[in-house]
Image: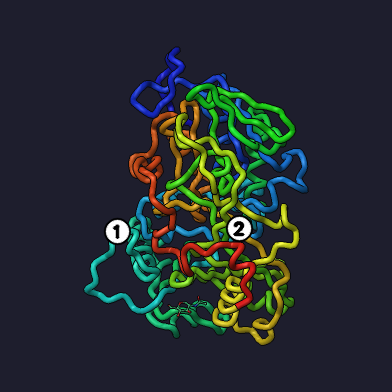
Amino acid sequence: MASSRPPPTSSPSLPPNSQPFSPPASILIVGSGLFGLTLAWSLARRDTFSQCSITVVDRADPSSPDVFPSPDAASVDTSRIIRADYADAAYAALCMEAQVHWRRQDKPTHLGAQGRYTETGLVVVAEQAPAPQREIVVDKSEMTGMDYARSSYDNVLSLAARHPEHIRSVRELPNAEAIRGRVGTGGSSGTWGYVNEGSGWANAGASTAWLFDRVKSTGRVTFVAGTVTSLEHDGATATGAQLAGGRTLSADLVVVAAGAWTGGLVDLSGQATATGQVLGYIDLTEAEQEHLGRMPVLLNLTTGLFIIPPTDRVLKIARHAYGYLNPVTGSSPLPCSPTAPAPQVVSQPLTHLTVPSLSIPKEGADDLRRAVCEMVPLPGLAERPFTKTRLCWYSDTPTGDFLIDYHPQWKGLFVATGDSGHAFKFLPVIGDKIADCIMGNCPAEFRTKWAWKPAAPVVITEDGSRGGKPGLILAEELAATH
Ligand SMILES: *[C@@H]1O[C@H](CO)[C@@H](O)[C@H](O)[C@H]1NC(C)=O
């Protein structure tokens, strides 16, 4: 949806402040993950940018379907939860907007068609029954899984009340038996929860491919295969990106949307950090697929463990937790200001693409195993080895809010990152919001949330949705056998 704007002035200035927006002659988007691709899609369709050249650079070669999108990116693999179930009303409402698109499946070209979206329902569970007299926790940093689940329940109830077609879709599951009944696998989890029949899951790889086709069909976007090693600048102005091999790409506006890799290009100290999250996959028999194929998505907010209904005889188990940090030296991000030193140590993704033998720490594997035993206790499943494990890297912020803003110190630099592991569901709508932010029109309800913040001393995501222990170091956990 292109928003109408006053005609551009001749001033070359860019927001933040209150100057009128004048589109740059060229935009370079670093990263073709969810934020980068959706932004390119939105810009390509806006009249305001009709004279602007749009380039997307990614380490995965877009002309090669075998490697694009990159198989270790956070925007690929089999499945993502699509839920309006948020403790935060603004994200819940934004998801409601996105779900209209996910549910479209009449034509093969619709986003939700061809198995890209399945509405199985989502069961959210947590610790114990909510005490009726307890105050709702407003300070996110003190929120427990239970608080999150309860606020989320309140939010989806009130959303459902405003949308009569969803009124019957949200139902409390007041005890373990009720949870077991709705989950239908024979397992249960938690002691209080609710089901939202209006939530489900998306095939992430197929949806990203769908998005990529949309972007290509605009004919407006140039894709470049290359690994960006650093950003270029001239004084206090970002001017482009340096690629491995020596090539340089220049642009009037540089947008870094490199997900968990962003911190290697722009100093995000105190804003966001890369955290690795564990995933495991187990092959199923046809009968098991048949049995579990009808289960809802099951999310335990006390531990962050969740299971997505299997497809093609593969069951995925994952943990939305504090994750692992992988502090490394040797990257050279643009410092937090033109006069500041570059950070010494940055948490950077470590994936099976660069280290093929990489496996997940025992601590994480044990936890995934616990989820199998408790949530899907089919005979023989608990002992069956994982066919594959994986680390999925989030760009985590202290509040779990995205970071979508102009850089406060570098001109010509915009950052769209901080997915905090919950951005995928916004695929149909987030590009337009990022473009609005670029034009100085950030949606009012997200202006503060998505803004560059005063630096936090350490980045630990305290939005109430994470399980596990904060601050685990990947190398130490990999070395530990417990
Ligand atoms: C789910 O949450 C309950 C508390 O509500 C906890 O005792 C249990 O260990 C969790 N199970 C899993 C598999 O995460």
Q: Quadrant of residue 53?
A: top right
Image coordinates of residue 127 in percent, x first then y, are 39, 77
Residue 457: in sight, yes or no?
A: yes
What kind of element bears circle 2? strand
89 to the left or right of 44: left
351 to the left or right of 1: right
Q: Nearer the viewer, residue 303 or 317?
A: 303
Q: Quadrant of residue 143?
A: bottom left
Residue that mark 1 sits on: 139
Spatial CA span between label 2 and label 1 = 28 Å
Disc 2 residue type (three-letter): Cys
Badge 2 residue CB within 8 Å of ligand 1 = no
**Category of crowding for the residue at label 2, using alpha-carbon neighbours closer than 10 angstroms: few (below 14), some (14–19), many (at least 20):** many
Q: Which mark is residue 348?
A: none
Disc 1 residue type (three-letter): Asp
Image coordinates of residue 108 in percent, x first then y, are 66, 49
For the C terminus, the quadrant is bottom right
**Category of crowding for the residue at label 1, using alpha-carbon neighbours closer than 10 angstroms: few (below 14), some (14–19), many (at least 20):** few
Give yes or no for contact between labels 2 and 1 (Cβ–Cβ under 8 Å).
no
Residue shown at the point (48%, 25%) measured from the top left: 236
Image coordinates of residue 356 in percent, x first then y, are 75, 58
Residue that mark 2 sits on: 392
274 to the left or right of 222: left
State which tag comes first along the sequence, 2 or 1. 1
Q: Quadrant of residue 245?
A: top right
Image coordinates of residue 463 in percent, x first then y, are 39, 59
392 to the left or right of 178: right
Residue shown at the point (64%, 55%) measured from the top left: 350
Query: What residue occupies the far bottom of the structure in this picture?
Result: 379
